[in-house]
Image (cartoon, helix red, strand yellow):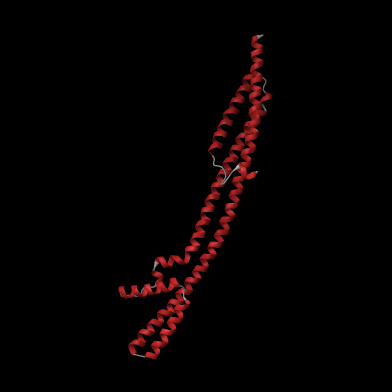
Amino acid sequence: MSDKKTKMSREVCLELITVILLGVTAILIAWATWIGSLHAGNQTSNFTKSNNLTAEGNSEWNEASQLKMQDFMMFNQINALYIDLAFAESKGDTDEIDKINWKIDELLDLLHEDLVDAIFWAFDESAALGYAVSPFDNEEFENTYFEVAREILNEADELLEIGSEEGSHSDAFGLVTVIYSVVLFMLGIIGTFKKPNYKMAVVIISGVAWLIATIYMATIPMPTDFSLFNFF
């Protein structure tokens, strides 16, 4: 009689553990599915922002290239005028000197300040080195053309990287969901076994799988800026 009661007590305990595992696993599947979908949403959002910024950055880069080409042509004109000025000064032609100086002043007024500074830097370098130096040889000045474009493209790359990480986390939560689903399946078929030892074996295997999935899920980062209070 005592053995029968003990056997019944074990079966009741086993059923209780099974029911608890079923309930908790179902809740965790819902949680993992939801968090995985949030990661996937963040991935899509970041990829979209990255694509938009990449297009904007490429547009800025093209505009900067066009501006650089225009500035290069203006510098060539001014450089040619300074050559003409040197020739006029050697001839002592004051009228031509005044005319060329007027042209140079007019052109310089049309240029942006960075280019004007770079041009005079180039003239100073040319005089010091004894050979022609272009303002575009100044790396610091050269970088000013593409500074905005680089900032935008760098931001796009950062968002792309964040999006890729969010995608990896979404896949990880998907794997957790699969493991929990296997646990549910195993616990669901436990009633088909007649012998308690078989049932116990299934519960143990399910419990180990559940534990592995839960520990793994705990190591996966939550979505960016995630807070439950944002949904209430």
Res. 53 image quadrant: bottom right
Res. 117 image quadrant: bottom left
Query: Residue at the location (41% across, 85% down)?
Result: 100
- Seen from the viewer's position, the closer of residues 198 and 146 is 146
- Seen from the viewer's position, the closer of residues 119 and 205 is 119
- Expressed as whole percent of the image width and height from the top left, the position of residue 75 reads 43, 76
Whether residue 85 is situated above or below residue 9 in the rendered picture: below
Query: Residue at the location (43% across, 81% down)?
Result: 105
Q: Would you say 22 lies left or right of 121 here?
A: right
- Can residue 195 be seen from the camera position used here? no
- Expressed as whole percent of the image width and height from the top left, the position of residue 150 reads 48, 61
Q: Would you say 127 lies left or right of 10 here?
A: left
- Can residue 31 be seen from the camera position used here? yes
- Seen from the viewer's position, the closer of residues 151 and 213 is 151
Give the position of the N terminus as an image quadrant. top right
Res. 179 image quadrant: top right
Query: Residue at the location (58% across, 53% down)?
Result: 47
- Expressed as whole percent of the image width and height from the top left, the position of residue 217 reads 56, 37
Tag count? 0
Q: Residue extending furthest right?
A: 192
Whether residue 204 is situated above or below residue 29 in the rendered picture: above
- Expressed as whole percent of the image width and height from the top left, the position of residue 149 reads 50, 63
Q: Would you say 213 lies left or right of 88 here?
A: right
Q: Would you say 225 lies left or right of 185 here?
A: left
Give the position of the C terminus as an image quadrant. top right
Whether residue 104 is situated above or below residue 159 in the rendered picture: below
